Image (spheres, grey):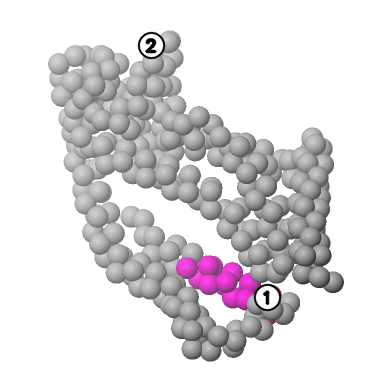
C-alpha cells in the first residue's frame, strides 16, 4: 500500500476513534446515575469551588470538556501511531486541576501573610469604635487584596442581614485555611466571651508572626532537599539524551515494539511517582 494510503487510513482511524471515544463518554454522561457522570459532576464542582476561591468565573465544565477532547485525540494517536501516546493521558487528566489548586494555594498563602497585620489593624480599630462590624468595615479599607476581597464579601453578607458570626464562618469556609480558621475562631470566641478583644487580637497577631517565622525556617532547611530532588528527577532525561546522541539506534526497541512501549510507559510512571513522593516527603508542615 502506498504511503498516501497508509496516512489516509491513519487519519481515518484517528477520526473514528476520537468520534467513538466521544460517543462512549457522551452515552455514559447521559445516564443520570452512572459512575462516570457522578464522578464528572464531583470533579466539575471541585474546579468551580477553586475558581470561586480565585474570584474568577466558574469554568469547571469548559475545562472538563477540553480535557475530554484532548484525551480523545491522544487515544486516536495511540491507536494509529504509537501506544506511547497513552502516557500523556494521566498528565492531561491531572495537570489542569493541579494548576488551579496551586493558584488557590498561592492566594491562601498571601492571605495568611496578611493576617497578622490585619489583626493589629482590627485591634486598633476596636479601640476607637466599640462595634466589631464597624471595625471590620474600617479595617477592610486598610489592607490589600486578596484579604480585602474576602473581608468585603463578609461585610456585604453582614450588611444584608446575616449574623456577624455566620459571616465570619462563611469567610473561613470559603478560604479553607487552618490559619485563617484559627484566627477567625479566636476573634469569635473573644467577642462572645466578653474579654479584652484588642489585647487578644494583638497576642494572636504575635503568635501568627512567630508561626510564619518558623515556617520560613523550615522552608529554608528543606530547600536544599527539594533542589536535590529536582536534580535527581531530571537526571534520567539527561542520561536518555546522552545515550541517544552517542548510540542513536540503541533505544529503538523501546519505541518501536509493544513490549518496549509498555516498559517505557511503566518507567515514566514510576519516574513521575518518585518525584511526587519526594515532593510530598519534603513538604513539611509545622
Element at badge 1? Answer: helix
Query: From mark 1 to mark 2, how far is it between C-alphas?
Result: 62 Å
Please identify the quadrant where the N terminus is shown: bottom right
Is residue 67 covered in magenta?
A: no
Q: Can the viewer see residue 135?
A: no
Q: Residue 117 placed where, x, y %?
A: 20, 34
Disc 2 residue crowd, few under 14, some 14–19, many 20+, Cα 10 Å: few
Of residues 164 and 265, the one nearer the viewer is: 265
Q: Nearer the viewer, mark 1 or mark 2?
A: 1
Q: Residue 67 placed where, x, y %?
A: 63, 47
Of residues 215 and 142, the one nearer the viewer is: 142
Placement of 1 over or under 244, stated as above or below: above
Disc 1 residue crowd, few under 14, some 14–19, many 20+, Cα 10 Å: many
Q: Can the viewer see residue 127?
A: yes
Is residue 271 covered in magenta?
A: yes
Q: Residue 243 placed where, x, y %?
A: 50, 85
Which residue sits at x=54%, y=68%? 273
Which residue sits at x=59%, y=54%? 92
Residue assigned mark 2 = 159
* Highlighted range, magenta: 260-275
Which residue sits at x=35%, y=27%? 149
**Is 151 left or right of 129, judged from the image as shown?**
right
The mark found on residue 216 in the picture is none
The mark found on residue 261 in the picture is 1
Which residue sits at x=59%, y=75%? 267
Q: Image quarter for residue 124? A: top left
Element at badge 2? Answer: helix
**Is 62 left or right of 192, judged from the image as shown?**
right
Q: Residue 214 placed where, x, y %?
A: 24, 54
Placement of 129 over or under 192, stated as above or below: above
Of the image marks 1 and 2, the number of the one nearer the N terminus: 2
Amino acid at each position: 500500500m502506498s504511503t498516501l494510503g497508509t496516512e489516509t487510513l491513519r487519519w481515518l482511524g484517528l477520526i473514528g476513534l476520537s468520534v467513538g471515544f466521544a460517543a462512549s463518554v457522551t452515552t455514559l454522561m447521559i445516564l443520570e446515575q452512572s459512575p462516570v457522570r457522578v464522578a464528572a459532576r464531583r470533579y466539575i464542582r471541585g474546579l468551580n469551588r477553586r475558581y470561586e476561591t480565585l474570584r474568577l468565573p466558574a469554568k469547571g465544565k469548559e475545562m472538563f470538556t477540553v480535557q475530554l477532547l484532548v484525551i480523545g485525540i491522544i487515544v486516536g494517536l495511540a491507536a494509529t501511531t504509537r501506544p506511547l501516546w497513552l502516557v500523556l493521558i494521566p498528565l492531561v487528566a491531572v495537570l489542569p486541576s493541579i494548576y488551579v489548586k496551586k493558584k488557590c494555594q498561592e492566594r491562601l498563602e498571601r492571605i495568611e501573610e496578611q493576617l497578622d497585620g490585619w489583626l493589629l489593624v482590627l485591634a486598633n480599630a476596636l479601640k476607637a469604635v466599640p462595634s466589631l462590624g464597624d471595625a471590620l468595615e474600617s479595617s477592610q479599607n486598610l489592607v490589600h487584596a486578596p484579604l480585602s476581597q474576602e473581608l468585603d464579601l463578609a461585610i456585604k453578607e453582614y450588611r444584608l442581614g446575616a449574623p456577624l458570626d455566620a459571616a465570619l464562618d462563611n469567610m473561613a469556609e470559603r478560604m479553607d485555611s487552618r490559619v485563617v480558621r484559627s484566627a477567625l475562631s479566636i476573634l469569635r470566641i473573644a467577642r462572645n466571651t466578653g474579654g479584652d478583644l484588642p489585647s487578644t487580637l494583638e497576642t494572636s497577631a504575635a503568635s501568627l508572626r512567630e508561626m510564619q517565622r518558623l515556617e520560613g525556617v523550615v522552608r529554608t532547611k528543606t530547600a536544599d532537599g527539594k533542589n536535590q530532588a529536582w536534580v535527581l528527577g531530571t537526571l534520567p532525561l539527561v542520561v536518555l539524551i546522552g545515550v541517544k546522541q552517542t548510540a542513536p539506534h540503541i533505544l529503538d526497541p523501546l519505541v518501536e515494539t509493544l513490549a518496549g512501549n509498555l516498559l517505557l510507559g511503566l518507567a515514566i510512571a514510576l519516574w513521575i511517582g518518585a518525584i511526587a513522593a519526594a515532593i510530598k516527603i519534603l513538604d513539611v508542615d509545622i
